[in-house]
């Protein structure tokens, strides 16, 4: 293939610049040796690739695409005969492509960086490429280049692993930057959510391990809770040692609170005389409203001053309200329950 001269490239780019409007972007240039093949302009979405436009390559190799500019910086690609060119489109109105003996991209510095990342992944050992990608990410974590670098794969194996704590630093940097600059961008929302979910998942796992370790080592076998009741008197969960205990994390502000308390009263009235106690923990924001709602309840009710931020929620790994635990007479956790039917069965077994 014959190398295209710079003067010809400049003329092509000038033509492209004159043909793109404020709300569109253009990709134009020459690709040698692909006459008769179909050239596609495609959008690289989060879960799929969509064809934006296509044309059959002429013998001259010249092509031109014009498409609506995305609301946020995004990723596109040119594809012909199994070969692809990835493009970052943001404020760039026109991108020039010249592909003869080598690929040259003009008018889009970020697309050039993506090209460098692809060359690096193909030509360098994985750790050497990864070091290069890390530099790119940290230079501008809010760019589509950093985003692209995070999701590169070699042999279908991701270069960066979000579950690896060292790699997660880079996911967090990009996610935080995208969320700060483009909070409504779908890519921002999905990436930020992925990072948060992984972090929370690890914390839940750590809390579960810590809880089990504490239970195994604790004299009371369960983790004690000491919080003030509606009269301001501190009530300890451990005061019911030797009893079968329902530990209930709940709140008066949930929609079905009245029905929920009715079911709890049924459980309490049925089993209290046989040795069942109920200890309820509330994270309610209003102390006065809470006191009014729980004052007539016959079992122990306590409240945290700092809501669900109190360590007791993390210690017991409470992720939603209500959450029910049952302890046997030895203080061992029998189980965690989401409904009263299964809770009653477990209580019957223990009593």
Image (cartoon, grey):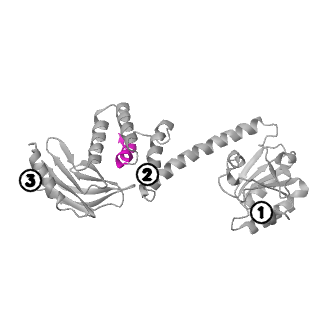
* Image spot of residue 2 (x, y percent): 8, 43
33 in magenta:
no
- The residue that label 2 is drawn on is 178
Q: Is residue 327 left or right of residue 40?
A: right
Displayed quadrant of residue 51: bottom left
- The region drawn magenta spans 143-157
* Image spot of residue 222 (x, y percent): 78, 43
Residue at screen point 53% across, 46% down: 198
Of badges 3 and 1, the one in the foreground is 1
Q: Is residue 120 left or right of residue 305?
A: left
Residue at screen point 26% across, 44% down: 112
Q: Residue 290: give its label.
A: 1
Please state which of residues 273 and 240 is positioned toward the viewer in this rendering: 240
Please state which of residues 91 and 303 is positioned toward the viewer in this rendering: 91
> Tag 1's secondary structure?
helix
**Residue 158 in view, yes or no:** no
Residue 141 drawn above or below residue 185: above
Residue at the extreme right: 273
Residue at screen point 16% across, 48% down: 98
- The residue that label 3 is drawn on is 60
Identify the mark nearer the N-term, 3 or 1: 3
Residue 21 drawn above or below residue 246: below
- Count neighbours of disc 1 (C-alpha within 10 A) and say few if under 14, some if 14 to 19, many if 20 or more: many
Of badges 3 and 2, the one in the foreground is 2
- Count neighbours of disc 3 (C-alpha within 10 A) and say few if under 14, some if 14 to 19, many if 20 or more: few
Q: Is residue 30 left or right of residue 149?
A: left
Q: CA distance from mark 2 to mark 1?
A: 40 Å
* Image spot of residue 140 (x, y percent): 38, 44
């Amino acid at each position: 293939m014959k190398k295209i001269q710079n003067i010809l490239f400049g003329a092509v780019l000038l033509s492209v610049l004159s043909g793109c409007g404020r709300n569109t972007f253009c990709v134009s240039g020459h690709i040698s040796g692909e006459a008769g093949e179909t050239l596609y302009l495609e959008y690289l979405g989060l879960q799929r690739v969509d064809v934006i436009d296509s044309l059959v390559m002429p013998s001259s190799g010249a092509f031109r695409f014009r498409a609506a500019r995305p609301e946020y910086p995004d990723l596109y690609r040119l594809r012909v005969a199994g070969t692809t060119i990835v493009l970052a489109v943001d404020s760039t109105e026109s991108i020039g492509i010249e592909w003869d003996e080598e690929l040259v991209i003009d008018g889009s510095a970020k697309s050039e960086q993506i090209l460098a990342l692809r060359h690096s992944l193909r030509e360098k050992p994985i750790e050497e490429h990864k070091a290069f990608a890390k530099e790119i990410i940290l230079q501008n974590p809010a760019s589509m280049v950093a985003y692209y670098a995070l999701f590169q794969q070699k042999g279908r194996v991701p270069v960066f692993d979000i579950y690896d704590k060292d790699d997660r630093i880079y996911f967090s940097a990009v996610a935080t930057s995208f969320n700060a600059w483009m909070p409504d961008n779908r890519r921002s929302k999905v990436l930020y959510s992925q990072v948060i979910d992984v972090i929370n998942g690890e914390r839940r796992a750590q809390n579960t391990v810590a809880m089990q370790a504490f239970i195994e080592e604790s004299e009371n076998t369960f983790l004690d809770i000491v919080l003030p009741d509606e009269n301001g008197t501190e009530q300890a969960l451990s005061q019911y040692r030797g009893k079968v205990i329902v530990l209930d994390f709940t709140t008066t502000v949930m929609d079905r609170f009245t029905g929920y308390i009715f079911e709890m009263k049924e459980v309490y009235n049925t089993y209290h005389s046989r040795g069942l106690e109920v200890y309820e923990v509330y994270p309610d924001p209003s102390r006065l409203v809470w006191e009014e709602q729980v004052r007539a309840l016959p079992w122990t009710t306590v409240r945290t001053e700092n809501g669900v931020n109190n360590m007791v929620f993390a210690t017991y790994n409470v992720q939603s309200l209500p959450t029910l635990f049952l302890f046997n007479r030895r203080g061992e956790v029998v189980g965690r329950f989401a409904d009263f039917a299964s809770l009653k069965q477990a209580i019957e077994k223990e009593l």
